[in-house]
Amino acid sequence: MRYQRPKGTQDILPDVAPRWRMVENTFREVCRRFDFGEIRTPIFEDTDLFVRSVGAETDIVSKEMYTFEDKGGRSQTLRAEGTAPTVRAFLEENLQGQDRERLVKLYYIAPIFRQDKPQAGRYRQHHQAGIEAIGSPEPAVDAEVISLALTFFEAIGIKGTRLLVNSVGCPACAPSLVDELKASVADSVGSMCRDCQRRYETNTLRLLDCKNEVCRQVTDGAPKMLDLLCGECEAHFDGLREHLEALGIAYEIDPRIVRGLDYYTKTAFEFRHDALGAQDSIGGGGRYDGLVEQCGGPSIPGVGLGTGIERVLLVREALGLADEEQPREGSFIVAIGDEAWLPAYRLLHDLRRAGVKAEIDYRRRSMRAQMRYADAQGYLNAVLLGGDEIAKGVATVRDMLSGEQEEVALDGLAAHLKGE
RNA sequence: GUGGGCGUAGCUCAACGGCAGAGCACCUGACUGUGGCUCAGGUGGCUGUGGGUUCGAUUCCCAUCGCCCACCCCA
């Protein structure tokens, strides 16, 4: 085997591509209904964009980015995340215009690159369908974003999604959680896992995320962000709950949801599905009220989400949502004998030009082989052309399901094949 | 990045120091212009790659690449 695809990537072949198309088309349709417009940003950006927005200390930036230097000596990075490029374009292209409070709603379907170790449901190039709603501080918009995701999951047949929500506060109140958390855990740090002992200093909030039993017991007694929210953040969280409930959306409050990107404020949420293994998150997102400003723009709030196409496909597979059986379609031209080859070849192209899906056997094999092939490949009919047909100016059209066949004049054949 | 498991025909898998096999799929024929069912025959492999041990390696050892599973983290 001479060349192989890069580790953690995949070739999406014609037999599975329809699943991708179905999921992508459904996402587009749901976005259309929610009035989000599509945006396509470059597949790479200045490295700084990700470093400054996602956060230099995050795992994504500190160890997972595909970064390279271009010939001009600029540091560039393959899209590591969907929100930062969208916000960059929002500012660069002045999508808000003169109305500083206008809500701009964008969606994208794009590959994301992260150099971590591949695992079930985790790839170095994966694909996210995501949305960003930039310009409104209203919790009703947070709920709309969540509602869109659930509508999407439902539309592709995924049941049993769990929604977890939390608030991570804002610059006014979040720092106090770090202090309180440190104080609360200080005496027990020694009993926690090695990772947590490190996190205690470097990334204190992540202590809440640890799955280790001992660590959980320690942090169970720790103060929760939700108890320390400032008035504004608390009101926002209440507003989110109010709007979710108005939509009849079930959710769990999980104070341990701490998303791995530094720009989140207030709302953080995640969708999980039990059909998956360890990587059970099929989507996540939250509010990023400081991000636009961090990216050099005015202070404009935003909220968004990303959902992983591969994970969604894995869930569909686990739930037994097989592909729709592909109906038979198209015509297979069967050339009988050498004298029929050129007329058949011409007929093939006439049919295609007229809008009929058609194929022929370039190996010029026996009629039997051609018929077998036409059957195995799932064509709806075989169009037989031999000496008899040519003499009469007709073709014999055989229905491959019923076995019935009839002679059809060549000049009306395309219409016949399309019209039935 | 760390740990464990696995790489044999297009696919699913045997063989576990001694000539590399089966089922399915594919091709040809029985059937001279008619697919599916049946039967007969056939193609197909540097056993992931590179070293080592051995008279002999798919098998044992080392390395490497990839996949799978978990950790970390995330979609």
Image (tube, coloured by chain):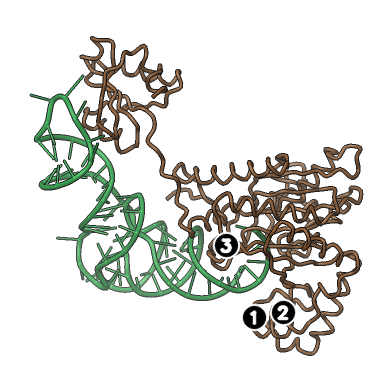
Question: Label 1 is placed on what type of residue?
Answer: Asn
Q: CA distance from mark 3 to mark 1?
A: 26 Å
Discs 3 and 1 share one subunit? yes
Mark 2 touches mark 1? (CB < 8 Å): yes
Residue A132 location, x and y as percent?
Answer: 75, 49
Q: Nearer the viewer, mark 3 or mark 1?
A: 3
The reply, left or right, for residue A259 in relation to residue A175 is left
Tell me the shade of chain B. green
Question: Label 3 is placed on what type of residue?
Answer: Gly
- Quadrant position of the C terminus of chain A in the picture: top left
State the residue in front, A19 or A158.
A158
Residue at image coords 68%, 62%: A270
- Residue tagged 2: A196
State the residue in front, A265 or A416.
A416
The reply, left or right, for residue A393 in relation to residue B73 is left
The reply, left or right, for residue A335 in relation to residue A178 is left
Residue at image coords 71%, 50%: A82
Residue A399 location, x and y as percent?
Answer: 29, 29
Q: CA distance from mark 2 to mark 1?
A: 9 Å
Tell me the shade of chain A. brown
